[in-house]
Amino acid sequence: MVVGFEKAVSATKSVISSAKKTPTTLSSDSVINFARGDPTIYESYWRKLGDRCTMVISGNDLMSYFSDPGNLCWFLMPELDHAIRKLHCVVGNAVADDDRFIVVGTGSTQLFQALLYALSSPDEPEPTSVVAAAPFYSSYPEETEFLCSGLYKWAGDAYSFDKDGPYIEVVTSPNNPDGAIREAVVNREGGELIHDLAYYWPQYTPITGRADYDVMLFTFSKATGRAGSRIGWAIVKDKETATKMVKFIELSSIGVSKESQLRAAKILGVISDDYQNSGPNKEEKFFEYGQRLMSERWEKLREVVKRNGIFTLPQYSQDYCNFSGKYTDSNPAFAWLVSKDGLNCDNLLREHKIVTRGGTNFGVGSKYTRISMLSSDEEFILFLERLSAMKGTTNGNY
């Protein structure tokens, strides 16, 4: 018998519980940050599942560097490999058959860096150009330039790219920040494509088919709301590309946390099992829950924007979703807000203590700004209240 063990466990649970329940009450003067994509919108769903997502790791578990020495991605836990392939099969959003390589990373950010390394050649006289069609994800330029690599460099908007030689085009679909469905723009010989499909899940967009590209990036955070686990994965056709990615991750972090991988495998497994074992009286499942919440938020935001007359939002057409078996709307993770009068949209909102990410970060003008639709209910309600109060208050000084 271990003396004091029960007290220690009780104390630990108390600390964790207290951390989870830290008060987040916002006052009318609070600054609310909608520049981030922190997906706290899903907290209530996971809370109601209780112990179904609980896992226990013993003190002597997971001690080795190696997860699966026989796998090309030797630090990928077999449980996560299985869970990823299973979920893509259930949802039908990507081809993840056994002939594809799964490479796990510490979020899709690390995988993006690994791909830039893997798809660039050290034999070229100049760094490989990296482009994306504007508006592009605001972190692509910084992530590309951060290591000051001689292998590749940021070359800006794919629409205006006209340089000869090898290039890498990043295609984000649905796009961050504007939610548009994207295809490659450059389409020239010597190019490599990275398809970032972080938001190609049923709560954000209709699933119109199984994506089948050479390289596809996904992230645990946007698929399930589990941003803190820092797990992303790439589905890769080419063995040499996957091998180079694994080498990059090996040298930068010697693999990926096994604890986080098992956590991700557990969560993904719960989602898949709910769909595969669905009965007539089952409660609302994850993707239906997410789709309903996102739809409700977009409907409320559109009502407010229509009333205040200051901004506009993109319009999205319905499409048939193979996953749900019906026509559904797009409900992107971010709202791409535009000032009707061409004012600096980000500055205008900051005057009302709403922090957003302005259009210049995405390669376009300041009349645009990106707003996260993934915040907590409390923050989103306060955001709508402030946006409603802005009617007729602009003075043109932005």
Image: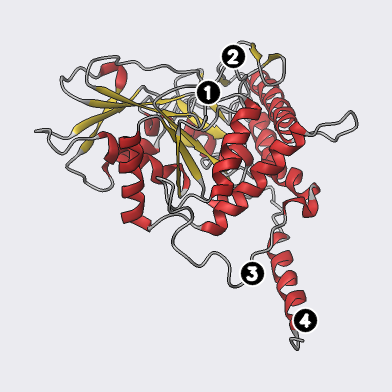
* SS state under label 2: loop
Sequence-first disc among 2 and 3: 3
Q: Amino acid at mark 2?
A: Tyr
Sequence-first disc among 1 and 4: 4
Sequence-first disc among 1 and 3: 3
Residue 228, percent from left and from top = 56, 52
CB-based contact (under 8 Å), mark 1 and mark 2: yes
Of badges 4 and 2, the one in the foreground is 4
Sequence-first disc among 3 and 4: 4
In the picture of the structure, the residue carrying the numbered disc 3 is: 58
Residue 252, percent from left and from top = 33, 55
In the picture of the structure, the residue carrying the numbered disc 1 is: 179
Q: Amino acid at mark 3?
A: Ser
In the picture of the structure, the residue carrying the numbered disc 2 is: 316
Sequence-first disc among 1 and 2: 1
Of badges 3 and 4, the one in the foreground is 3
Residue 240, percent from left and from top = 30, 36
Of badges 1 and 3, the one in the foreground is 3
Picture mark count: 4
CA neighbours of label 2 inside 10 A, class few (<14), some (14 to 19), many (20+): some
Measure how far apart labels 2 and 3 are at the Cα level.
48 Å
* SS state under label 3: loop
Residue at 37%, 57% (x, y): give it: 253
Above or below 358: residue 161:
above
Residue 108, percent from left and from top = 45, 42
**Is residue 16 found left or right of 373 in the rendered image?**
right
As drawn, the label of residue 287 is none
Q: Amino acid at mark 1?
A: Gly
Measure how far apart labels 1 and 2 are at the Cα level.
9 Å
Q: Amino acid at mark 4?
A: Lys
